[in-house]
Amino acid sequence: SKTARMFSNTPPWAKSKVKSRSSRVGLQFPVGRIHRLLRKGKDSERVGTGVPVNMPAEILELATNAARGNKKSMDSPRHLQLAIRNDKELAGVTIGQGGVLPNIQSWQS
């Protein structure tokens, strides 16, 4: 407000402190970078503001569940790969150092 600005030490032309979207939401991964890469990619024409926050959180949750299934406490690229390949919506994504899904074919004689 105008009266609060009159009694403060900051000049009226000074802008407020810039906060990243990651710090606003309380996340560790770069929300702005993910949003930029989603817009730059050819996956869809438009990307909503909630997508770069919710999609990586969902993927990390799936990877954490895969890590717990393998009795590990930390996520690895392998757990990301297992989580993404088992999800129907994300099946086309490739993760570096993720390996392949286990698939044993039985030989019939």
Image (cartoon, rainbow, N blue to C red):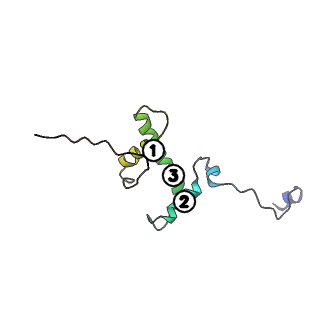
- Cα distance, mark 3 to mark 1? 19 Å
- Would you call the spot at circle 2 few (<14 residues within 10 Å), some (14-19), or many (20 or more)? some
According to the picture, the residue beneath numbered tag 3 turns out to be 54
Q: Nearer the viewer, mark 3 or mark 1?
A: 1
Residue 36 falls in which quadrant of the image? bottom right
At label 1, the amino acid type is Pro
Question: Which tag, 2 or 3, sits closer to the chain's start?
Answer: 2
Residue 46 against residue 26 in the figure, above or below: below
Q: Position of residue 71 (x, y in %)?
A: 42, 31
Q: Are marks 2 and 3 in contact (CB under 8 Å)?
A: no
Mark number displayed over residue 77? 1
- Any mark on residue 99, and which? none
- Pick out the residue farthest to the front: 97
Kind of residue sitting beneath label 2: His
Residue bearing the label numbered 2: 35
Give the Cα distance between marks 2 and 1.
Answer: 21 Å
Type of amino acid at the residue the image marks with label 3: Asn
| Residue 90 shows in this picture | yes
